[in-house]
Image: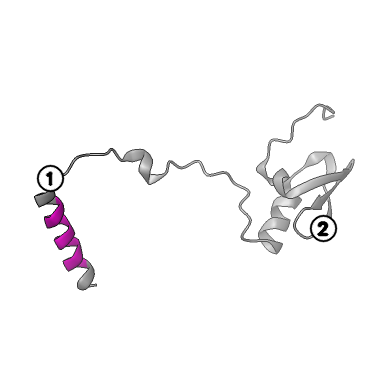
Amino acid sequence: MASSNRVNKSDVWRSFTKVGAAKVRCNLCSRELASPGGQTTGMHAHLRSKHPGVDTVPSKTTPITGYMTSRNCPESRSEKISNALALVSAHH
């Protein structure tokens, strides 16, 4: 039996509010769903089918900027790089 002190860890809970011992309400459309024992399967399915743009999975990826370091670039090299990029984009 689940403890009454149980913390709802799934991110799906951001989109739902508990309205009874085994019921939840979607914060987006107010539809009530069964959630026996706090199960989140039905909530995930509801979001996928009715609100596909809502992301319930937190991003665990590192942004590209997390892999980059800042470097000084001499003006002459910067100009060559800019010109090369301009040529590539003009051909595509």
Q: Quadrant of residue 36?
A: top right
Q: Does the magenta-highlighted stretch encompass residue 43?
A: no
**Which contiguous range is marked in magenta?**
78-88
Does residue 91 appear to the left or right of 1 in the view shown? left
Q: Nearer the viewer, residue 25 or 48?
A: 25
Colouring convention used in this rendered image of the protein: one colour
Q: Residue at x 82, y 52 (%)?
A: 25
Secondary structure at numbered mark 1 = loop
In the rendered image, the residue lying farthest to the bottom is 91
Q: Position of residue 48 (x, y in %)?
A: 66, 58
Q: Does the magenta-highlighted stretch encompass residue 86?
A: yes
Q: Which mark is residue 42?
A: none
- Disc 1 crowd, CA 10 A, few/some/many (<14, 14-19, 20+): few
Could you tell which of marks 2 and 1 lies nearer the N-terminus? 2
Q: Position of residue 60 (x, y in %)?
A: 50, 41
Does residue 77 appear to the left or right of 92 in the view shown? left
Q: Position of residue 58 (x, y in %)?
A: 57, 44
What residue did someone put label 1 on?
A: 74
Instruction: Name the quarter where the N terminus is drawn.
Output: top right
Taken as a whole, is the magenta stretch helix, strand or loop?
Answer: helix
Q: Nearer the viewer, residue 15 or 87?
A: 87
Q: Position of residue 53 (x, y in %)?
A: 61, 60
Q: Residue at x 71, y 63 (%)?
A: 50
Please name which of the two marks, 2 or 1, marks the residue nearer to the observer.
Answer: 1
Mark 1 residue type: Pro
Q: Quadrant of residue 10?
A: top right
Mark 2 residue type: Ser
Instruction: Name the quarter where the C terminus is drawn.
Output: bottom left
Q: Residue at x 15, y 52 (%)?
A: 78
Secondary structure at numbered mark 2 = loop
What residue did someone put label 2 on?
A: 30
